[in-house]
Amino acid sequence: MNRREDCADVLIIGGGAAGCYAALTLAEERPELSVLLVDKAGIERSGCLAAGVNALNAYITPGHTPEEYAAYAAQDAAGIARGDLLLTMSKRLNEVTRRMEMLGLVILKDADGRYAARGWRNLKINGENIKPLLAAAVRRAANVRVLEHVDIVDLLKAEDGRIAGAWGIDLRQDAVVYLRARAVLCATGGAAGLYRPNHPGAARHAMWYSPFNTGAGYAMGLRAGAEMTSFEMRFIALRCKDTIAPTGTLAQGVGAPQVNARGKRYQAAYGNTTSERLYAVVSENLAGRGPCFLATHGITEAQERSLERSYLNMAPAQTMRWRETGRGPRTADVEVEGTEPYIVGGHTASGYWVDTARQTTVPGLFAAGDVAGGCPQKYVTGAFAEGAYAAESAARYAASHPLPEPTENVAKVQVRVERLREQSSRPSLYDVDALEEAMQQVMDEDAGGISTAYRYTERQLGAAAQHIARLTRLSEDLRAADAYGLLKIYELRERLLVCRVLIAHQQARRETRWHCFAENLDHPKQDERFEKYVNSRLRDGRVEIILRDLVGEGERYEHTFRA
């Protein structure tokens, strides 16, 4: 394999919403710094915004305050959230929204020229082109270079423990890429594909969350010694059946209530948090009152046309389904179902344990967006806000620290990679796809997937841990013929490590704080003893669980080593 070296003041890993906005922030506020943005795809259509979005779900509308939004998000998470992170994020939501409008994002207006709100914290947009707009602005930045089709595999560390850069694989040039930096900002997104999804087999990557988000950022951070938080607070989306399209557009856009097969509204009996809305559907189905629907039958023609346009901005499969079947939302209710679980810090609190500067517990490493924990209900604008905070903090760190020397040079990295290209003395009986499907089956059946109605027991979790350990050992025998083969091996290993840590978190939280998201049948109720953050880190190859006290109202948590 070839090899290539590069360096920058700030290295951004991941060109999704948070990564691109971080690059824009550095371009505007710190033009003297060199910035390298690396993405394993192309930034015009990478990350969770690849297909677009039809609303900004986090915005402070007139008459409301950032404190209200932070309180809402904390309540939805049953108190297991970082109030300091939520408040700092909320204070920046409107600023980043205005910035996106300046870049060309179409935010719909009412008759008085004000933003068209969808509820008290949402704005309607035409956002099919939101990612191309971001990418174009990044490419115009004089101090930002973009490196695409490069899969970052791992972080580089210096002797003093600081992050010194990262290395990865150039998927088009079949080369090892070795990148040094004064500060590294991780914005790789969450983890999908851990569980068997609604559509298994050849269609197992046809899912709600981006299938290319494999937990890479979590995995590289864990291997570098970073602390993680709240993996057990999984996110399971309530979505339109078969298309896995978002349901909020129906519920908020036309006020469609949830009804069961008998036409009865049932949500009030279960509560109205994010997890409870899913739990209501699961419970109604288990009780024999399913399937469940969003009751759209009878809406107006104008509302139907509006829904079709809205879904074309983010989930065109739903509009196509209505047109192909001839049964649009005006003539037929829309059936709903839950997805498989994901680990995603933009909706729940899973991710890196960070301080208000969005610095992780490893000096020189910052995190933003879905990969950063403690701050649920971020959505798109919250990812932008965190990208800005992390970029500003990374810039301060880079300006005050010299370029560190990694403990592992490019030659050693290349040797490690090329071993995966050599024929093993023990050829694997399995390929990546077979091991991935086996992993998804284990997680589905023993760690609370769709087939068990998202429920699990301690005994099942113990079995899951054993199976994931066995699959991890089998993955060590995999070999690759080319760069794409290497990518698939690394992605499988990332997912397996995240599964391992997730199971440890599920075992540690011996309660059911969130129905479906963490439904422990051995501990079916909330327990005040677990009003704590369940955190973890890898120590000598083992998952070490850390229980942290909650950060109280008005308090701020900061790392002691901040620059």
Image: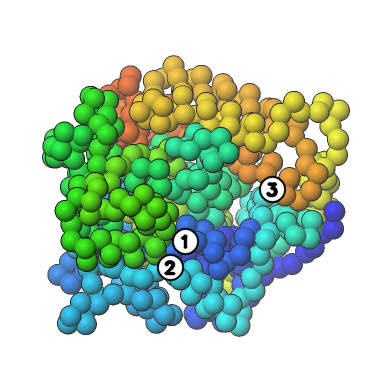
Query: Would residue 515 appear left or right of 140 to someone viewing this image?
Result: left
Residue 343 coordinates in the image, percent (x, y): 45, 43
**Can residue 303 be seen?**
yes
Q: Secondary structure at mark 1?
A: loop
Q: Nearer the viewer, residue 537 or 142?
A: 142
Q: Which residue is mark 2?
A: 128
Q: CA distance from mark 2 to mark 3?
A: 28 Å
Identified by mark 2, the residue type is: Glu
> Could you tell me how far apart the alpha carbons at marks 1 and 3 are, in whole angstroms?
23 Å
Q: Is residue 182 visible?
A: no
What's the residue type where badge 3 is placed?
Answer: Leu
Residue in the image at 64% along x and 74% along y: 145
Q: Is residue 398 above or below residue 419?
A: below
User: CB of mark 1 within 8 Å of CB of mark 2?
Assistant: yes
| Front label number (2 vs 3) | 2
Q: Which residue: 66% across, 54% down?
A: 152
- Callouts 1 and 3 close, C-beta under 8 Å: no
Q: Which residue is mark 3?
A: 487
Say whether disc 2 or disc 3 marks the residue closer to the N-terminus: 2
Mark 2 secondary-structure assignment: loop
Q: Earlier in the sequence, mark 1 or mark 3?
A: 1
Count residues near mark 1 (Cα–Cα under 10 Å), then give few for <14, some for 14-19, many for 20+.
some
- The residue under the point 30% across, 29% down is 512
Indicate the position of residue 250 as horizontal and vertical percent values: 26, 54
Q: Percent position (x, y) of residue 453?
A: 35, 28
Which of 561/150 is in front? Answer: 150
Residue denoted by label 1: 51
Mark 1 or mark 2, which has the lower sequence index?
1
Residue at 20% of width from left, 43% of height from top? Answer: 258
Residue closest to the eye, 277 or 374: 277
